[in-house]
Amino acid sequence: MNIFENIKMALDSIRSNKMRSFLTMLGIIIGISSVIAIVSLGQGGQNSITSEFEKIGAATVKITVNTSKAEWSDWITFDDVERIKEKINNVKYASMSLTMDGVLRTGKKSLDAYFIGGTEDMVKIEGLTLLDGRFFNRYEYQSGKAVAVIDENSAKRLFGTKDVVGRTLEAGPHDSMRKVTVVGLIKSPYEMFADMIPEDQFPVIAYIPATYLVNLYSEQKAVYQIYIMADSKDNAKTAGELTVRFLENRHGNRDREVYRAETVMQQMDQINQVMSIFTTFVAAVAAISLLVGGVGVMNIMLVSVTERTREIGIRKAIGAKTRNIMFQFLTESVIISCLGGTIGLILGLAGAYGLGQLAGITPAVSPQTVIVAILFSTMVGVFFGIYPARKAAKLDPIEALRYE
Amino acid sequence: MIKITDLVKTYKTGDIELTALKGVSLHIKPGEYVSIMGPSGCGKSTMMNVLGCLDKMSSGQYLLNGKDISRLSDNELADIRNKEIGFVFQSFNLLPRMTILENVELPMVYAGVPHKERRAKALEALSKVELSDRIHHKPNEISGGQKQRVAIARAIVNRPSVILADEPTGNLDSKVTEEILRIIQELNDEGTTILMVTHEHDVAQHSKRIIRMKDGNILDDSPVENRTIL
């Protein structure tokens, strides 16, 4: 009595009850396919976040002021930003990122907009792509010139054309707007959301020298958040720590731990952690349906044992041992769940790619996922098959033969 | 061959205790052809079950080919059933989803005989019962007499020393009965021990020795005179 005999017998039995076997498998199919789809989409989402972050720059560090502890004198001044760049060797670029709500107005249109104020380094730190003209330069930043860089989407909506370099528009809070000159056009930073949001609902944005922006809004030249970029990815952490120490020295607040440095990679890890907790949770919910599928397998196997009581009696009479009967039924339940698992795997992958196409995510399928799925469905077959198989194996041959 | 001494078998159903065999002793020598007769409830089926190692006795001793059966485990009994005993049932008891050939091969599957040898031996057994065509059909596609011949082929395929036939012709008409009895007689002529339960006197008349039972005891045990030979 070998394993192939068992497999052949099990397949015969599954084949002679096609509909029933398929319905039994359905639970496993649904369970495995949803787990596979969720896990590979989640993994794919994490991968795309990682690559986005790497594009922005793995060398970027965010320096924040803990505003709940800080006094006004602790805030990072525009002068601090200049000194950081000047004094700390590892820091290549530095900029504040100051955002203000306001309005942009041309001859024909007036739109709500965000103004983002920074130094001339912002183009590097944010990884912006210039399409036309140039970013505002060091001179324009230091002297607080009324210049702006806008993205193509905003250009089209404000001017109706992408040919905007050299044109002027009015910018500022709606009650005190001033003329600024467009010096550059950049690619829209929101392009990757184009699948989810219509383009005419993208935020309208303009990059403006922070020195001019605070002037426009009558604000102070101090911020609670800046970005620096180290000369290499490996130096990011060191550059962040040096910057924090430098700021503490300048503000004389070393003992209060007001500043915090966080690399972009650390931020990404946090997002990925949240993502994977979410993925795991949803996958766990889907795995419950596997459990339900397993109960279905057990149920059908119990019916099958009862139906085939006489067959079991005959087999025992002609010499089947307890373990022969046991393995016969166990093989059957394992094959049902394995087959269900395999179909579920294929459907799950198809679903992941289908949904991924809609959501703009490339699903990531790891060999581990596939192996775990098949292994898990096998285990479901063994776990839920063992009780019916034992029941069959323990039948008394005389009573089984008498069963009608 | 078969030697039972003081065989007692009691069944317990709830509080009621029923003694089906009340100390039966019996000796069957190799090559014998024995009929067991008696009214229903006389204990003949119970005796067949015990002799067939399907059921365990309550007390007494059972020697089969010199081997003490009384103390064997379930799996050892399965092995005895597989190699030493061939069963022929009144209702044929073929497996409906398997072909004729597969049904005959089944005891060898459990005996661990390799596939090729199995096929050859099954075909040999089938030719012995004169059934060489339709072997790839399912049991529900052949007649009752053919089914019983398949069952006999299955019983003899592992070359057992004894065949236990429980009313083998009970479901068959007289013409087919004769065919089956002729095959059984041939097997006996070749040296296989036959033990047959029947309630038909005509059928028992084919055997060499008749044991009559009543109320769990042997009433009479005598050789057959004027035996019908086919």
Image (cartoon, helix red, strand yellow):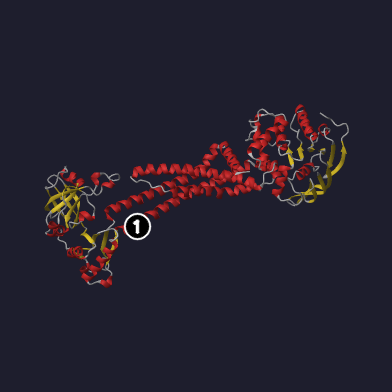
Can you see residue B227?
yes
Callout 1: helix, strand or loop? helix
**Chain identifier of the residue bearing label 1 in the image:** A
- Quarter of the image where the N terminus of chain B is located: top right
Instruction: Tell me: A370 left or right of A121.
Output: right
Q: Position of residue B179 (x, y in %)?
A: 76, 29
Q: Does A232 appear above or below B95?
A: below
- Quarter of the image where the C terminus of chain B is located: top right
* Residue farthest to the top, as pictured: B175
Q: Crowdedness of circle 1 by 10 Å Cα count: few (<14), some, many (20+)?
A: some
Which residue has dot 1 on it?
Answer: A269
Instruction: Tell me: A55 left or right of A273.
Output: left
Q: Position of residue B91 (x, y in %)?
A: 71, 35
Q: Position of residue A383 (x, y in %)?
A: 55, 50
Q: Does A275 appear above or below B213?
A: below
Q: Position of residue B220 (x, y in %)?
A: 87, 41
Viewer-side residue, A95 vs B65 = B65
Q: Does A394 appear above or below A9?
A: below
Residue A399 quadrant:
top right
Instruction: Tell me: A163 left or right of B83.
Output: left
Can you see residue B147?
no
Residue at screen point 62% across, 49% down: A390
Residue A115 quadrant:
bottom left
The number of numbered discs placed on residues in the rendered structure image is 1
Residue at screen point 44% across, 42% down: A347
Viewer-side residue, A213 vs A383 = A383
Dot 1 amino acid type: Asp
